[in-house]
């Protein structure tokens, strides 16, 4: 039993180590484009290290040779040599520092851009599964923490490792005996220093996490002030926010405590080792085993080697928390999009707007089928409405048209071509969507309309606004088209936001328009204005609409009644009302029939 447990533990440790190595390789992969610059950095780094080693050698030569012999000519020679070495040191250090910063910034930017690009490639299902806060945490918190690997750790690791190794070699060559005296202080720091630094780093990470949590709570407190006051919960919410602020402060103080302890312990080990070095070094000098110049040079090598060793060990300890953030980013980066573009897509010279659904069956992962064998054709320019009780697959069917999801069985065709054979740009470039809730950016009215077509001219934006019946209210805004609409369009009414969304569609000029309950959240006055704008937008375009207000689809060419993922009835508004079936019962507000009655 114990042997089996030990074997299992070993396998877990091996998997853990291999997982960490895989993450480190992924992080280092962003350095590949900069191989030539890395070579330059290594060569110049060796020059820096050699120059720094020349300084103690010069002091040793001066103390043991020049000063006892009073050879002033050699002193001038040494001084001139040191000036040349100093110039080389400054130049090589500048190159190393610049290249380190260049590589660090470019690699960290490449990593950040790769996360942004991957976020765009993930399918619609990712955003429905994952809260938007997760993506924000990835982009803000995790990316920033991992970027310290390139900006801070790698430059420090390269410089410190190089100088530490060369200094250690000079220490051993100068005096092997005196080098052994330094082992206790180094061993002491190796045993306890990483723990203090790891604790400090973990508290730092926790502090940053709590900062984000407090920031979100503060945002909710400010943005929902009206809700809190109406329900008389402002005081309770404020106490909760103050409690989290207190926790944040406590974590920060613990972080500072361990930071100071780590620094103090490092100084103790350095100067403790220096005290032992002086005591034993004095004995070696008295015994003639070490010259005064060698002891002075040893002193320089000691502080170089020990200082860089402790900095390197401290930095390695802090990378454990960086690896935690990197593991989340790596897990995100290896996610494959549910929907893949074709490797050899077909090109469509022109989109007419015909949509064909063949035996379409689909269910969300882990759930039962939502759509069950949808078969229908929507002709170019035809206006089709999807109606039915909530939860029967209407919105899911809409998501199939822009290929947010792929069907489990069957297919969707655009002008006779399967969507799986077309690029996302071809599909979504031909489609315009007006959602129930319009998202407006915190820029100007002009920018929000032009979002539909970034290359649109000002005149085209004006024409789109007129067609959407938005021009008049825009001109009454403080700065007209230059008015900043506020976060999510907070300065505009619901009807005004929807008309800006419709203006986006006009300037986009899509062949297919999808409406997802575009007027359901509006009052009667706003609905009439928006509906009139929609009527202009939909003229001559293939339209697929989900509508709960049946009055808005009276003039549609066809209505499909969706129940349990199937088309149960179809026809015009009058035809379905005269049939007095499922659509009639929905329109009259009667309860729906059971499945057996429908069959």
Image: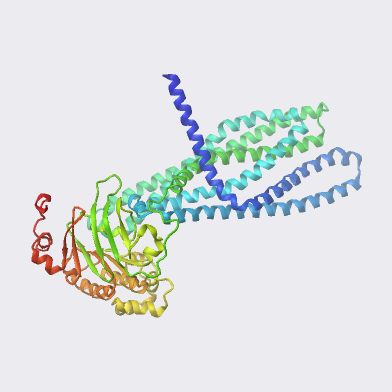
Question: Percent x, y for residue 190?
Answer: 59, 32
Closer to us: 119 or 53: 119
- Counting from the top left corner in percent of width and height, residue 399 is at 30, 58
Residue 256 visible in image: no
**Closest to the observer, 40 or 426:** 426
Q: Where is residue 406 in the image (x, y as percent from the top left)?
A: 33, 54
Q: Residue at x 91, y 44 (%)?
A: 71
Q: Can residue 166 be seen in this view?
A: yes
- Considering the image in quadrants, where does the N terminus appear? top left
Q: Which image quadrant is residue 328 in?
A: top left
Q: Position of residue 286 (x, y in %)?
A: 81, 28
Residue at image coords 48%, 27% = 10
Taking the image as shown, residue 554 lies to the left or right of residue 262, namely left
Locate residue 214 relative to residue 569 in the image: left or right.
Answer: right
According to the image, what is the colour scheme of the structure?
A: rainbow
Q: In which quarter of the image is residue 477?
A: bottom left
Q: What residue is drawn where x is 74% and y is 51%?
A: 89
Which residue reaches farthest front?
A: 416
Numbered disc total: 0
Q: In this view, does 75 lie above or below 487?
A: above
Q: Is residue 532 above or below residue 43?
A: below
């Amino acid at each position: 039993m114990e042997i089996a447990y030990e074997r299992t533990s070993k396998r877990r440790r091996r998997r853990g180590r291999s997982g960490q190595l895989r993450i480190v390789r992924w992080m280092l992969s962003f350095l590949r484009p900069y191989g030539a610059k890395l070579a330059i950095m290594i060569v110049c780094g060796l020059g820096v290290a050699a120059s720094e080693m020349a300084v103690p050698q010069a002091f040793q030569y001066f103390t043991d040779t020049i000063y006892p012999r009073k050879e002033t000519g050699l002193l001038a020679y040494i001084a001139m040599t040191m000036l040349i070495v100093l110039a080389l040191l400054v130049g090589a250090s500048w190159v190393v520092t610049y290249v380190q910063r260049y590589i660090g910034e470019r690699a960290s930017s490449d990593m950040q851009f790769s996360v942004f690009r991957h976020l765009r490639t993930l399918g619609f299902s990712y955003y429905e599964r994952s809260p938007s806060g997760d993506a924000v945490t990835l982009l803000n918190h995790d990316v920033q923490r991992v970027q310290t690997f390139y900006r801070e750790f790698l430059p420090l690791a390269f410089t410190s490792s190089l100088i530490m190794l060369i200094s250690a070699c000079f220490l051993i060559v100068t005096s092997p005996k005196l080098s052994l005296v330094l082992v206790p202080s180094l061993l002491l720091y190796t045993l306890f220093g990483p723990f203090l630094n790891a604790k400090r780093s973990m508290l730092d990470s926790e502090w940053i996490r709590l900062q984000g949590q407090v920031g979100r709570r503060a945002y909710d407190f400010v943005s929902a002030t009206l809700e809190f006051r109406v329900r008389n919960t402002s005081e309770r919410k404020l106490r909760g926010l103050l409690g989290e602020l207190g926790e944040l402060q406590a974590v920060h103080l613990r972080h500072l405590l361990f930071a100071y302890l780590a620094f103090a312990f490092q100084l103790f080990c350095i100067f403790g080792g220096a005290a032992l070095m002086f005591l034993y070094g004095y004995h070696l000098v008295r015994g003639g085993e070490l010259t005064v110049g060698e002891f002075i040079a040893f002193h320089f090598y000691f502080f170089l080697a020990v200082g860089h060793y402790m900095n390197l060990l401290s930095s390695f300890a802090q990378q454990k928390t960086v690896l935690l953030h990197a593991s989340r980013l790596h897990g995100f980066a290896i996610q494959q999009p549910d929907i893949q573009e074709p490797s050899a897509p077909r090109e469509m010279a022109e989109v007419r707007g015909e949509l064909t659904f063949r035996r379409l069956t689909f269910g969300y992962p882990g759930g039962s089928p939502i759509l069950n064998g949808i078969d229908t054709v929507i002709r170019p320019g035809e206006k089709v409405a999807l109606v039915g009780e909530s939860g029967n697959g209407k919105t899911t069917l809409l998501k199939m048209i822009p290929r947010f999801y792929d069907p489990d069985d069957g297919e969707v065709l655009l002008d006779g071509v399967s969507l799986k054979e077309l690029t996302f740009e071809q599909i979504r470039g031909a489609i315009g969507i007006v959602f129930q809730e319009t998202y407006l950016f915190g820029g100007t009215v002009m920018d929000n309309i032009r979002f539909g077509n970034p290359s649109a001219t000002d005149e085209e934006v004006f024409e789109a606004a007129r067609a959407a019946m938005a021009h008049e209210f825009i001109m009454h805004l403080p700065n007209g088209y230059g008015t900043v609409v506020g976060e999510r369009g907070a300065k505009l009414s619901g009807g005004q936001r929807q008309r800006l969304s419709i203006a986006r569609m006009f300037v986009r000029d899509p062949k297919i328009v999808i409406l997802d309950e575009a007027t359901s959240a509006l009052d009667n006055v706003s609905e009439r204005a928006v509906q009139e704008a929609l009527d202009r937008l939909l003229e001559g375009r293939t339209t697929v609409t989900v509508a709960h207000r049946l009055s808005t689809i009276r003039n549609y060419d066809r209505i499909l009644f969706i129940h349990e993922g199937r088309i149960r009835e179809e026809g015009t508004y009058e035809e379905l009302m005269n049939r007095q079936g499922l659509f009639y019962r929905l329109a009259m507000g009667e309860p729906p029939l059971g499945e057996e009655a429908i069959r």
